Image: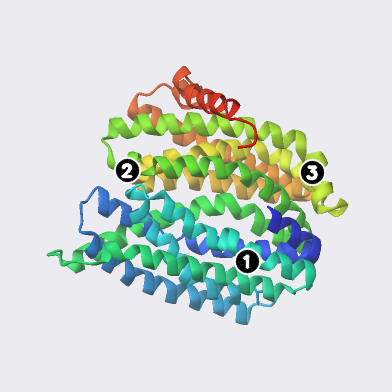
């Protein structure tokens, strides 16, 4: 968030819009890579050797990188105004490798490794480019170079941590294993691509219809809303191994518990953001970004809904092994989001994109939750209403904090 504020104030709405566009383009490539889910599925449910899974993973990763770089470079070269995609092409191989490796780490509950890898682009790069933007008035190119370097560092760390999975000999037949991973990864990629387009289609449409400056303002509302996703992402990451490895009944219970915590914390966070946004947005970003306040308010219902979907996605992908099921839910939501955004932008401006996005997220949650309830028999109330046991950890946390001696 601090990095977002600095970029907006030093590079203006246009520079902020281009950087948002670069991030969205990279995320599109990453979500179209379903290999992380395939690796976790082979490792936990198919009980494949980690060394054999790693070899197949590296072969598919190399082919994916070559294809993605070629497409991005061609668009950047031949399409006017798309030069920023050269930077995205440079980041792709490193970001893909760091992302793909998480399949092993999450399956083993090694959240620490995942978090440390994410710190390099998410925190380390920001700490580097903030002083350069503030004190040296560095241009957008310097910002993008540091952004790429963050993913390079993340991939190096992931490679180091992956070493324990790649050693040893196995009797696995590499051909069928590779094809099995590729087939599951392809299905997961389609699901992820639909999710991302549902998540970012408003960004691309606003870029095309309203331009960089309006996207820069709109992106502030997105960034504020994404703060809530950090809460649910942490919970979903911690629950991933339990959902993937347990029996279906155990995984269903873990999924429901995860959803209740995500929903309750997101509601509380949304209330705080709704109250604080009118004061903080002009203060932090400047008067030019006041339009982001309304965008933030309109996005909050969708943000709360999207915060709750992650556990359901893990259940369907890792426990049930049905990427096509998630794909069907998200395609419906994507179509609604795209059509509604195109229809509402001429009438409401960027606020129309926020309305359309919230509607699509709520629909996506409703479809996924309805199928989950039907399959598992768990009551809908257990997905959203906190129980007495859910409150105990928070009560204990508050009590422990209150008992801390002053000065410690």
Q: Where's residue 321, x and y in %?
A: 31, 46
The one of 49 and 329 positioned closer to us in this rendering: 49
The residue lying at 29 percent from left, 30 percent from top is: 249
Q: Does residue 306 appear anywhere in the picture?
A: yes
Task: State whether residue 81 appears in this view.
Answer: no
Residue tagged by mark 3?
A: 280
Left or right of 249? Residue 259 is right
Task: Report whether 15 appears left or right of 36.
Answer: right
Label 1 sits on a secondary structure element that is helix
**Gap between marks 3 and 2, in whole Å?**
40 Å
- Vertical placement of residue 381 versus 220, above or below: above
> Is the Cβ of the residue at disc 2 closer than 8 Å to that at disc 1?
no
Where residue 16 sits in the image (x, y, percent)?
73, 62
Q: Residues within 10 Å of mark 1 (few under 14, many from 20)?
A: many
Closer-to-camera residue (17/366): 17
Q: CA distance from mark 2 to mark 1?
A: 32 Å
Q: Which residue is mark 1?
A: 22
For the point 80% across and 53% down, the residue is 285
Q: Where is residue 66 drawn, in percent x and y? A: 43, 77
Chosen colour scheme: rainbow
**Quarter of the figure with the C terminus:** top right
Question: Residue at horizontal 67%, vertical 70%?
Answer: 143
Earlier-in-chain disc, 2 versus 1: 1
**N-term-proximal mark, 3 vs 2:** 2
Which mark's residue is nearer the viewer, 3 or 2? 3
Single out the residue that lies furthest toward the left.
171
Q: On residue 244, which mark appears?
A: 2
């Amino acid at each position: 968030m601090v990095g977002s504020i600095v970029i907006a104030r030093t590079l203006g709405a246009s520079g902020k819009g281009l950087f948002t566009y670069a991030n969205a383009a990279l995320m599109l490539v990453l979500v179209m890579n379903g290999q992380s889910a395939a690796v976790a599925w082979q490792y936990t449910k198919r009980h494949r050797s980690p060394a054999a899974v790693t070899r197949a993973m590296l072969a598919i990763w190399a082919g994916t990188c070559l294809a993605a770089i070629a497409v991005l470079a061609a668009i950047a070269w031949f399409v006017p105004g798309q030069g920023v995609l050269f930077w995205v092409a440079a980041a792709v191989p490193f970001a893909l490798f760091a992302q793909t490796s998480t399949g092993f780490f999450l399956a083993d509950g090694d959240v620490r490794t995942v978090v440390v890898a994410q710190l390099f682009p998410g925190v380390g790069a920001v700490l580097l480019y903030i002083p350069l933007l503030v004190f040296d008035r560095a241009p957008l190119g310097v910002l993008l170079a540091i952004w790429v370097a963050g993913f390079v560092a993340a991939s190096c760390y992931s490679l180091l941590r992956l070493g324990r999975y790649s050693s040893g000999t196995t009797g696995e037949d590499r051909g069928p294993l590779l094809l099995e991973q590729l087939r599951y990864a392809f299905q997961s990629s389609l699901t992820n691509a639909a999710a991302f387009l549902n998540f970012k289609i408003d960004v691309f449409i606003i870029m095309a219809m309203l331009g960089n400056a309006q996207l820069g303002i709109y992106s502030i509302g997105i960034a504020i809303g994404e703060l809530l996703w950090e809460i649910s992402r942490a919970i979903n990451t911690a629950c991933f191994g339990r959902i993937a490895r347990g029996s279906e009944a155990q995984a269903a219970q873990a999924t429901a518990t995860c959803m209740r915590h995500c929903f309750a914390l997101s509601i509380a966070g949304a209330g705080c953001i709704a109250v604080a946004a009118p004061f903080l947005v002009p203060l932090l970003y400047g008067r030019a970004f006041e339009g982001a306040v309304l965008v933030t308010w309109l996005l909050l219902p969708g943000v709360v809904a999207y915060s709750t979907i992650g556990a359901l996605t893990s259940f369907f992908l890792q426990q049930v092994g049905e990427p096509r099921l998630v794909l069907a839910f998200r395609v419906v939501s994507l179509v609604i989001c795209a059509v509604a955004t195109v229809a509402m932008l001429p009438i409401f401006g960027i606020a129309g994109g926020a309305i359309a996005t919230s509607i699509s997220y709520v629909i996506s949650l409703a479809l996924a939750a309805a199928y989950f309830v039907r399959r598992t028999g768990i009551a809908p109330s257990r997905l959203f209403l906190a129980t007495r046991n859910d409150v105990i950890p928070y009560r204990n946390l508050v009590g422990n904090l209150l008992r801390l001696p002053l000065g410690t």
